[in-house]
Amino acid sequence: MPLVSVIMSVYNGDKHLEKSLSSVINQSFLDWELIVVNDFSKDGSGKIIQRAMQEDGRIRCIENKKNLGLAASLNLAIEESSGQYIARMDDDDVALPYRLEKQVDYLEANDHVGVVGGRAELIGAKKGIRRHAEKDLDIKNRTLFSCQFCHPTTVIRRELLERSGIRYDESFRTAQDYKLWVDLLPHTTFHNLSENVLKYRVHSGQVSATKRQEQKENTHRIYQIMLEHMGLSVTNEMLRLHEAIASFSYQSQNIVEVNLIKDHLYSLIQANTSKLYFPQEVFSSFLSELFYNILKRSSISKKSKVDLYFDSGFHRHFKPSLAKLKLAIS
């Protein structure tokens, strides 16, 4: 039985699939199996997978009889797999040679962590580094607003999935990874490594207008699930405000809008006081700093910034230095 099961879903991915498979085969860590789900591809993906299977007996393939989508295909791969750790890969990304070794070493040394991700180097149509929060509470606080794992960098403990009974939600054709992390959030500790583990391919025009709208709708569904779990009655206006905050670079010139943001963030603090969905003081400090930064970027008057911050009560949870405060209201 291998220690690591790498799971990959392929749909018409023949352009980059061979490089992706090779990056798994060439890992410094050797105790793995690769479960590839061919999700009814119409291109040459099947032949590439068959060739790889002939060259390396650690690779197996599930052939879908129709296109099931990513979530259902990954769930099939999980059920077929046998490893103690389940590592994600996409058919167009490239795992760095020491990826599995580093992530397995981390999980072996930190048995309280159920999911570990890492940074990713962007390749293709966009360059740079994709990074997220690294520590558990930072990841969980930010998950209220956005996905905090680069999906194909993640490794999950099988024990966590078996204990919780959680799998990918197949009603989500997009944002299924975000939904998975939200579902797992109360059950485990999260972590992101502070180093690159993967080359993540960005395609030109990667998301169509239709898919972008579906992504937005599914993200709103996830927001609604989390907010309702905190005991809030969710409205379309609340979802609009939540989405605006989620960019973490939101800027408003309108004092009415800033007041709405203030009220929404404070309602989250109050809701969490009774539900304790997040550790209270850390969560309150996070949202207070978030509002402080929104004020800092805002072009409303200095007096309004000061009045809003201190009248709201946020200052009790996040106390910037006097120098930072003067800079914020300038």
Image: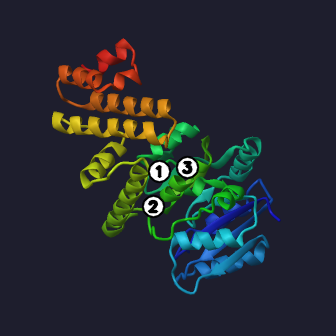
In what element is the residue under mark 2?
loop
In what element is the residue under mark 3?
helix
Q: Residue at x 28, y 46 (%)?
A: 241
> Which quarter shows the N terminus?
bottom right
Q: Residue at x 24, y 31 (%)?
A: 298
122, 37: nearer the viewer: 37
Q: Are marks 1 and 2 in contact (CB under 8 Å)?
A: yes
Q: Is residue 159 above or below residue 171?
A: above
Residue holding disc 3: 185
Label 2 – label 3 distance at C-alpha: 16 Å
Residue holding disc 2: 175
Q: Is residue 301 left or right of residue 230?
A: left
Mark with earlier residue (1, 2): 1
Q: Is residue 80 left or right of residue 15?
A: right
Q: Residue at x 49, y 40 (%)?
A: 276
Q: Position of residue 174 (x, y in %)?
A: 44, 65
Residue holding disc 1: 147
Q: Is residue 241 above or below residue 41?
A: above
Q: Residue at x 39, y 52 (%)?
A: 228
Q: Residues within 10 Å of mark 3 (few under 14, many from 20)?
A: some
Check the image and tell me how it is coloured: rainbow
Q: Position of residue 323 (x, y in %)?
A: 35, 13
Residue 86 - label: none
In what element is the residue under mark 1?
loop
